[in-house]
Amino acid sequence: MTPANDTIRFENVSKFYGEVLGVNRITLTLGPGITTLVGPNGSGKTTLMNLMTGLVQPSRGTISVLGLEPANATQFFCNVGYCAQFDSFPRGLTGFQFVLDGLMLFGMSDEDAHGLTAESLERVQLDAAAARRNIAGYSKGMRQKIRLAQAIAHHPRVLVLDEPLNGLDPMARAESLALFQELGRQGMHVVISSHILDEVDRISDRVVLITGGYLIAQGNIHEVRQEVRDKPMQVLVRCNSPELLASKMFAVNHCVEARLHTDGHGVFVRTADIDQFYRVLNEIAVEGLVKIEAVAPADDNANAIYQYLIGSDGSAA
Amino acid sequence: MQQAFASLIGALRQQPWALWWIQFRRFARIEIRRNLFTKRAWWVYFLAFIPVVIILLHLLIDTHRGFNMSDDTQVLAGVVQLYYVRLGIFFGCLGIFSRLIRGEMIERSLHYYLLSPVRREVILLAKFFAGAVSAVVVFGSAMIIDFILMYVGYGAAGQDYMLHGPGLGQIEAYLLIVVLACLGYGSIFLLLSLMFRNPMPGAMLLLGWEAINPVMPSLLQKFSVASYLRHLMPVSVPAEGVFALLTVETEPVSAWVAVIGLLALITAVLVYSCIRMRRLEIRYTTD
C-alpha cells in the first residue's frame, strides 16, 4: 500500500461546468510511475488534470497530490509541474526567459535559476540558439518542448502532461518518451494524456480509461485487459507451420478465431480461455509437429483496450 | 480571546513572508516590464502625454501673450480634474489593470502564473502593484512635465512660482491625486476584470456613476473615486454647464479624510478581488 503522501488521490470527485458534466464520481489513486489517461475527446481527461493542479475546483469530492492541496501553492507547485495543452505563452519572451521567469518565482538565486533553465532546455533538447529566440517564432514542436522544459525545470515529483506528443516529429516523440520513461524510473509520478496510444502504451505502468466523464477502468494494462472478459484475448504465435497450428487450434472449443499473419510466419489466435489456450499450445509444442518460436499477447495494449471498452479506434480519438 | 489572538499571531509568523516578498518583487518586475516596455503600452503613453503636447504647443506658439500665471494655473487644474482624472487616468487604468488578469485569460497565458508556487493573493497584489507603478510612472511623469511646461515660459517668475511659491504645493497635490486615482481606478478595474469577461460595460457604468455622483446622497458619494479626489484639488476649477457637475464639491471634507476614505475603499476592493482570485478557474474555452 503506497502511503498517502506518495500518491495522487481523487475521492469521489465530480466537476460540473454549469449543467455540463466534466467528470463524475471519480475515485482514483495513482502511485509513482507513468500513468496514461485514455479517452475520447471531451471525455474528461483535461478536466482531471486541471482538477489535479487546481486550475479548476471540484464541485464535489477531494483531491490531494502527495498529501498536498493546490490551495497551498507554495508547497504544492514546488512538487508539481504541469505541461498544459494550451498552446499560448506570455508575449515578448524568448524560450530561455520563459523558463527562467518561472523559476525565479520559486525564490531561488539568479545563478541557480540560470543553471536549472539551461539544464531543462538540454533535457528537452532545445538548442541554445533556439532558446534565445522569441517564442512567437517557434514551430509547434518547439513550443511543445519549451512548455515541457518549463514544467520539469524545477525538478517536480509529479509531472502532469496533457497531450505532450502533439506536434512533435517522430524523432522528438521518441526523445520525449525516453525522457518520460527516465523520469518514471526515477520514481516520479508522470501522468500523461495522449491520443498516440501505441507510443505511450510502451512506457505506461498503468492506464486510466475515461469516457463521458466516468472512469471505465484503471490499472496495469495487462490486468485491465484480463478484466475485459467478454472480448476473447488475441495471441500471436510465431512458428514454422502456422496453417497446422491454426487447424489444431480450431479443434478446441475456446478458440474463436485463427488468422494467419501477413508474413506467413505466424498465426493470430483469439481465445475465450487463455489458460486453456496455453495448455493446448504446450501440448502442441510437446508433440513436435509445430516448432514454436515466440508467443506474445496481441491485444493487451492501450489501443486494443480502448477499442474494446470505449468502442472506437484510439488513434483517431 | 487573547489566546485566539496569540495563536493567530503565531500562525502569521509561521507563514513564509520572506519568500512571498521575493515572489512579489519578482512578479512585479515581470509585470512592470510588460506594462511599460511593450507595444501594447503605447496608447497609455498617448493618453498621458496628449496634454503635454498641447501645453508644449501653447508654450511655443502662444508664448504666453494675453495669459498670466493665474489663468494657466486654472487651466492646469482643469486639465487635471477634467482630463486626467475623468478620462486619461480612467481609460489608462482601464487598459492597464483590466489586462492584468483578463488580458492574460484572453491570451490564454494566465495558467502559467496560477501553476507557479506563488499564492494567488500574492499574484494579484503583485500584479496590482505593478499596474499601479506603471500607471503612476506614466501619468506622474506626464503631470510633472505638464507642470513645468506650463510655467517655464514665465522665466524667473515661473521658476519662483514652481520652486518657492504655491506651485510646489500644487504639484505635490496633483501627484497625490495621480497616485490615488491610479490606485482607486486600478483596483476597481482589476476587480471588474475578475468579475466580467468584458469589463468595458462595467467601466462605462463606472464613468457614468462618477459623473452623476456629486448629485447623489452623501452615503453613495463614499463609493466614488473622483469624489474623494475632488477634495484634494489645490485649485478649484470654475466650470459652467455640464462641466460644473464634474467639479462641484457637495460635501466638503478634509484632505486626510479623503485620502483615508479612498484608501479604505481601495483596500476593500482588493480584499474582495483576492477572494475572487482564490476561486478563479481556468476555462479558456468559455472565456
Image (tube, coloured by chain):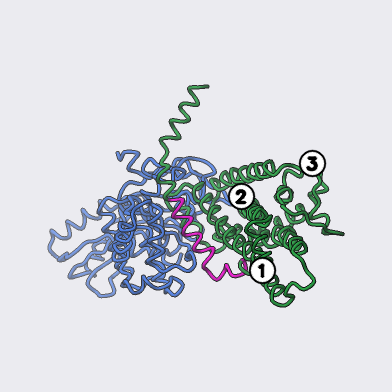
Chain colours: A blue, B green
Does the image show residue A269? Answer: no
Q: Are marks 2 and 1 on the same chain?
A: no
Q: Is B61 covered by the magenta stretch?
A: no
Kind of residue at disc 1: Gly
In the rendered structure, the residue with mark 1 lies on which chain? B
Q: Left or right of A123: which side holds A74? A: right
Label 2 – label 1 distance at C-alpha:
67 Å
Kind of residue at disc 2: Gly
Which residue is nearer to you in this view: A234 or A131?
A131
Q: State the SS at label 1.
A: helix
Label 1 sits on residue: B155
Q: Where's residue B115, x and y in %? A: 44, 53
| Residue at image coords 51%, 67% | B37
Which residue is nearer to you in this view: B102 or B51?
B51
The numbered disc on residue A18 is: 2
Q: Where's residue A69, x and y in %? A: 43, 42
Kind of residue at disc 3: Ser
Question: Dot 2 surroundings within 10 Å: few (below 14), some, or many (20 or more)?
Answer: few
Label 1 – label 3 distance at C-alpha:
45 Å
**Are the residues tagged 1 and 3 within 8 Å (C-beta)?**
no
**Are the residues tagged 2 and 1 within 8 Å (C-beta)?**
no
Q: Are marks 1 and 3 on the same chain?
A: yes
N-terminal of the two: label 1 or label 3? 1
Q: Where's residue A111, x and y in %? A: 30, 58
